[in-house]
Image: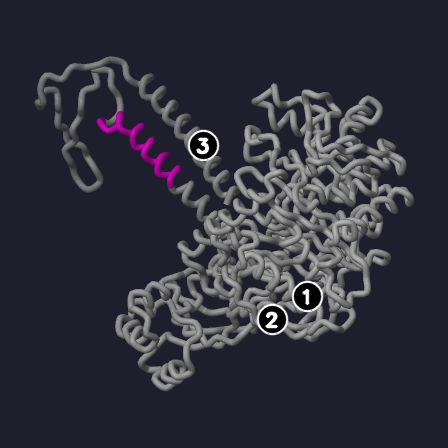
Amino acid sequence: MLFAIIAGIITLVVLALVALVVLRRRSESAASKLVSKQQVNAIDTVGVVAEEQSTGFGTKAAVQVPTETGVTGTPAEPLRGRFVAVGVFAAAVFGSLTAKLWSMQVMQQAEFARKAQQNLYTTVYKPAPRGQVYEFGGEALVKNRSAYTVLAEAEVANNREVVTRLSALLGIPSAVVRQRILNASSGAQNTRVVASDASLRNLAFIGEHADAFPGVSCENRTTRVYPYGTLAAHVLGYTGTVSEEELKNVPEGRDIQSGDIVGKNGIEASFDSTLSGDHGARTMLIDAGGNVLEVLSETAPTRGNDVYLTIKGAVQRVADETVAAYVMGGVCTATSVVCLDVRDGSVVAMANYPTYAPESFIGGISQDVWEEFNTEKSHYPLMNRAIAGAYPAASTFKAFTAMAGLTHHIIDHKSKTDCKGIWTGFGEAFPQACWELNGHGEQDVVLGIANSCDSFFYDVGKGFFDHADELGLTAMQDYIQEYGFGRQTGIDLYGEASGRIPTPEWKAEYFKDAPEESAWQGGDFTNMVIGQGYVLTTPLQIACGYAGIATGTVYKPHLLKEVRNSLGQVVVEHKPEVLYVPEMDEEHIKLVRKGLREVMTINDYDRFVSEGVKYQVAGKTGTAEVFGKQDYSLFACYAPYDDPKYVVACVCEEGPTTYTSSIPMSLAVLEAAMAYDDGTLEKTFEPTHWTTQRADPEKLKKEQEEQYSEESEYYDYYDYSSYGEDFSYAPEGRTD
């Protein structure tokens, strides 16, 4: 095409130059012959002489025009230049047309032939059944089911009688039937879905009266089904029709056609290309009007591969039931729990509440329901809090800051702090409170962790501040990041948050419009060392970090166990991947692990462990203050203490007492994981149908206020509300 344009332009330029040359030559010739200008007063016969001339056949009259004026030639001589110009212009036009014709017939013959072929034949695609999703034990959590579908050709929309018959038969308003037939999102020549899940009776009627339904057909297609309701909803995710934006950004190697069903969230999205399968194709001969004349070939769609997860369904059931029960029972407003196998990073269970039913997205979801799912009132049931919820780590952070202090020799096994309830390490003018206002007395590393003594850890934070010249201002942060904090873990789910470990550079950028707040100070260390201040983590990060404490290795968390094709053959098998191996001296980690074990014994948290359990649990509580809300409680634990297998992390929003919320919830899931391995956990499970229901916030607030009044001695804290919503600080209270 470009060559043709260039050739045409060159031809026109050459012809124009030729025309200019000819016109100039003609004008010069005419000027040389024109001697004088004669004024003509009238037309007369004066001077015109008629003479007889002899010919071979007789004589004839001849007219002579006198030439004394000096003009020679015929009267039409001055018009010849104009005729030449017109001729040149015509030659230019026909020359350009000839060049264009030559270009089309010779130079672009192959391209136009290809386009003509495309206009003659068209291919439409049939969606492929998606692969199924299985839990660890082989039970299908996501299946396909047959759905009888009524389809119609595009031209049926113009047949009022057929539209009316379909409306009466299917019980769908005729305007809706016509609108569905006019919907060309699946392709101009593709058949349009009029109704899904049609009854066999309606299909039989259409088949028996085919003459009354020209252009209408019936097909057995598949649709998604989630047999266990809301079980593992945030892990599985949901599907929906591909959007325009998704069509513009199709991943490499993925074939997506308009109207396809694609994964929108969870595993359905993360492994969409694996689950999607290959389209079926139907090649047809069409006329100029787009009408199908003949079907030339047709291939059946190929079902996608099946994905097997590390999720253990029976453990997941316990997790789902537990978080739902505590929220619906008014203990907290929302919660999240995650259980990992510390030996390879596999996710055994991941549960959140409020939750949703993935099946509700099949066939689309109304705007009203979507908006309800994304409001503060519903508490965001679509949010996977385990990976996307950013929370203060609170005192669960102390295991890592203790290891940082030991590794950098800020403290050792002999270090002690005399806790009096108020710490004044930066001077009497800058007091900071321990959660135990009466003081813990003398505390070492083990007791500091076991009693969650803030004063002991304030000394650790001050030590990093005092040694900043030799260690730098980020020594503590750098060590903590070796457990995976402040960055994504890389789990095979979309939407993971990074969390935050504050540094002087981050603070300077964050407060760039408030220079008086941007300087890094000693208080930033003492707030961070107890997991408050600007620290943000996810439940998954806490679980991964405690896996590192328990074993010395942080594995990349993953949900994929393996992928199998339609023949049941394993085509992909997940290999464990080590993310971090934190620096840890054996003597140092023994002190921290001992402190975590004594958290359970000194505080009598072992009472939450079921009777008959033969293994020991190590763990750490935390209570976080969040701006504008009631306190959040956290708990992280692992077992067995002497040979760790599983770690559990739990966050309860507005569930301020750990011993009534996060501790029993975490231990219930931990025991389920251990019982699964022992064969004592029932591995069959019924569908769950939890809704987005949660506790009445007003009732919960009233109950908590009553509880606070009984424990007011723990709430004489400093007011940090001026820092805004992004700031959180709370010395430990009540249970720590």
Q: Which residue is mark 2?
A: 302
- The circle on residue 13 is 3
Q: Characterize the local packing of mark 3: few (<14), some (14-19) or many (20 or more) Cα atoms within 10 angstroms.
A: few
Q: Characterize the local packing of mark 1: few (<14), some (14-19) or many (20 or more) Cα atoms within 10 angstroms.
A: many
Q: Residue furthest bottom?
A: 208
- Observer able to see residue 117: no
Estimate the spatial distance between the alpha carbons at disc 3 and disc 2, rounded to whole Å: 58 Å
> In the image shown, does 407 or 94 lie closer to the viewer?
407
Q: From the viewer's perspective, is residue 19 above or below residue 176? A: above
Q: Which residue is mark 1?
A: 315
Name the image colouring. Answer: one colour
Name the residue: 79% across, 40% down: 448
Is disc 1 in contact with disc 2, using a CB cutoff of under 8 Å?
Answer: no
* Stretch in magenta: 75-93
Image coordinates of residue 607 in percent, x first then y, are 73, 58
Label 1 sits on what residue type? Val
Looking at marks 3 and 1 on the same chain, the residue that comes earlier in the sequence is marked by: 3
Name the residue: 68% across, 45% down: 622
Which one is closest to the eye, mark 1 or mark 2? 1
Q: Quadrant of the C terminus?
A: top right
Looking at marks 3 and 2 on the same chain, the residue that comes earlier in the sequence is marked by: 3
